[in-house]
Image (tube, grey):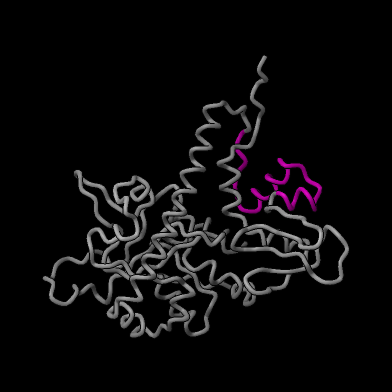
Amino acid sequence: MLAAPCAVIPESFKQDLLNRVDIVEVVSRYVRLKKGGANFQGLCPFHNEKSPSFTVSPAKQFYHCFGCGAHGNAIGFLMSYGGLGYVDSVKDLAASVGMQLPEMQPRSSEEARRDVERKEQETGLVAVMESAMQFYRAELKKTPRAVDYLKGRGLTGEIAARFRIGFAPDDWQGLKRAFPDYEHKSLVDAGLVIASEGKRYDRFRDRIMFPILNARGVVIGFGGRLLGDGEPPPGEAKGSPGPKYLNSPETPLFEKGREVYGLVQARDAMRAAGRVLVVEGYMDVVALAQFGVGYAVATLGTATTPVHVSKLLR
């Protein structure tokens, strides 16, 4: 006789929670951490030591001790260090980011299958967005007028690299060079390609490209800005260049009302200054960083919402 499905917290909720939680903030409640390169370090709370071997990675969102081998995510840390059960750990983290725990109904095999499919889709889209970002960055290096535009705005190559700025070529199907299987549905699902009336074409063309990262440093969307006021490339007829700023559409990865631009780059400066400056556009964030104001972020074409404020206060 088969056992009835157990009541569980949906995998989709758990993943959404881990995407919103900053493990550095969680661990910092209990462990004194210091910045060390790309990571944070401190004395391991799980064994006695005099030299720090405990590392927390904001990019990968996990902790690891090279002394005793302790390892895990934010949920695992609360379970191991705080002695909380799994459900209580999830409740604690959910409350800290303003999420309400769903009613834990028994999960059917169909729901389990959908959760697996959703996770697989998101993993695939993350890889697609990463490849697109690398393509746009490579295109910037070989497009002098785009480089000159950024230099004219006072930006250095160092700042462009820090924010992973790129350029979408003036080509209706430029992404074919990055994705030989240009017809794959993942390009549409990721918001990179538009499919209409049997035709496909790149959403972003002839624009400076600003990758939008989530709290874990994963590329989830893009913002594209026209060069200058949208003058067409030399030798081409003038026409409507479209909006000055163009964001990725809503996708399984990207919900613009919940995200801010520049959060990953601004995180350390925000903590050090004890403040955050919310500005209007991507270029404002990057220009301020160029002049030493590193705690600026931008909303993505929306008003500042309570969700944004909660994210920034964390």
Q: Residue at x 13, y 72 (%)?
A: 236
The one of 179 and 284 positioned closer to us in this rendering: 179
**Image quarter hosting the C terminus:** bottom right
- Above or below 228: residue 185: above
**Residue ranking furthest to the right:** 48
Going by the image, does 210 lie left or right of 173?
Answer: right
Q: Position of residue 180 (x, y in %)?
A: 32, 54
Q: Position of residue 169 (x, y in %)?
A: 27, 67
Which residue sits at x=35%, y=52%?
191
The mark total stands at: 0
- Residue at left 49%, top 38%? 117
Q: As rendered, which of 185 and 252 lies closer to the eye?
A: 185
Residue 294 percent across, percent down from the top left:
53, 77
Query: Which residue is farthest top?
Result: 1
Outermost residue toward the left in this view: 237
- The residues colored magenta run 76-103
Residue 37 is one of the magenta-drawn residues:
no
Q: Is residue 91 magenta?
A: yes
Q: Quick check: 114 left or right of 11?
A: left
